[in-house]
Image (cartoon, rainbow, N blue to C red):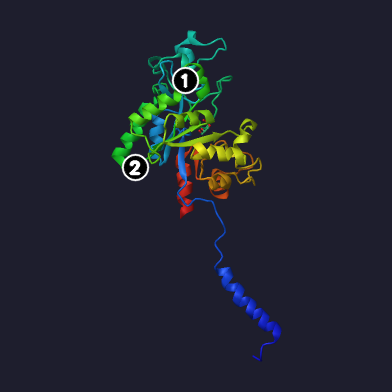
Amino acid sequence: MGPLNFMDKCFLLAALILIPAAHSLPPPESTESTEPKSVIAHRGASGKLPEHTLEAYTLAYGLGADYIEPDLMLTRDGVPIALHDRTLDATTDVAERFPQRAREDGRFYAIDFDLAEIKQLRVRERVEAASGELRYPERWDNSHRHLHFRIATLEEIIELVQGLNRVTGQSTGIYPEIKFSAWHADQDHDFEAILLDILQRHGYETRDDAVIVQSFEPESLLRLRELGCKLRLVQLISGGRAQDALVTDEGLDHIASYADGIGPSQARIIDDQGKVRPNNLVSAAHQRGLVVHPYTARTDALPAGIDSFEQLLDRILFGAGADGIFTDHPKATRKYLQERSR
Ligand code: G3P
Ligand code: CA
């Protein structure tokens, strides 16, 4: 090689300066957590057994859920029970057992029944109130007349999960949702105080304990903080326009002042073509220290534009980078995560 000319010397000098600089660049900023993804059994293993029953929770536990999710409503005597709706019509035989107890609208409200009455009801697979048809035809079919699934109380669920944790050595958590807090308050029930009392009596007191409390109502979570609650809280965010303000920068800043995470509808993560939305909701939440647990993954109710359950999980958990997911199908969700980690 002959002597270097002026241009060669310039390139060499630039390379000497720039190449080491390139190597010392920090990696691209990522807000994706390296923690394992959480499998949250939505209403128990509700894809396999009637939702919110001890049987569905037990199955979810055995299928490897990290958290068991009960929705909570109150009975007339103020007992938290696992129930999604205000009414009992779609998931129990209340109309046959207490035909005189419907309100003027023809519906049977849980808050009109004491726990002793609630315990007489048979829980069934969810049906459409108007038609009586199964909501999910591939699921439990309600024809097994000798079985008597009952509505569970929160305390029964806690005893079940803590009992199983003791004999298995696992540390499965619970993820209770306060339903209709303002509505209960209108009927003189302090739902947050009732819930906190039960959780504290069962040893759930700090953010390190295996419980996360969720609500769609910011006021409910703020009330928990006002009562001194130190547990982790998750702000649910529906897909409807009414809660759009919660996903703005200001909304997320506010949530970060009282909660530890968000639980957005999966429609806020993927669009109606099944593509991850470019709105950066997950990273915006992560930047504020909030975990993200979208809802709800179902093998038998895939969103538009999604071809398979695995594709749905892949887009939400790895495309968007969410930290966990509410799922009716904990076994299929766990299987997907195990196979992906190989
Ligand atoms: O709590 C997460 C998700 O369950 C919220 O929707 O209506 O099924 O309680 P919902
Ligand atoms: Ca829920």
Quadrant assignment, res 26: bottom right
- 22 vs 259: above or below: below
Q: Is residue 86 above or below residue 323?
A: above
Residue at horizontal 51 percent and vertical 38 percent from the top: 257
- Judge whether 160 appears above or below 183 on screen: below
Residues 324 and 201: in front is 201
Which disc, if any, is residue 340?
Answer: none
**Is residue 299 visible to the viewer in this orientation of the structure?**
no
Residue at the spot of label 2: 170
Residue at the spot 43% in from the left edge and 29% down from the top edge = 227
The numbered dot on residue 92 is 1
Image x and y of residue 258, in percent: 50, 36
The residue lying toward the viewer, choosing from 190 and 123, is 190
Q: Is mark 1 within 8 Å of ligand 1?
A: no
Q: Residue 69 location in percent, x, y? A: 45, 33
Find the distance from the CA under tag 2 to the CA under tag 1. Answer: 32 Å
Label 1, secondary structure: give it: loop
Q: For the residue marked with disc 1, what is the amino acid?
A: Thr
Element assignment for label 2? loop
Residue 320 location (% of width, % of height): 57, 47
The image quadrant where one finds the N terminus is bottom right
Q: Residues within 10 Å of mark 1 (few under 14, many from 20)?
A: many
| Amino acid type of the residue tagged 2 in the rendering | Gln
Q: Residue at x 59, y 36 (%)?
A: 246
Residue at image coords 37%, 15% = 116
Q: Is mark 2 within 8 Å of ligand 1?
A: no
Q: Residue furthest left?
A: 167
Give the total number of marks visible in the rendering. Answer: 2
> Which of the two residues, 241 or 168, is positioned nearer the viewer here?
241
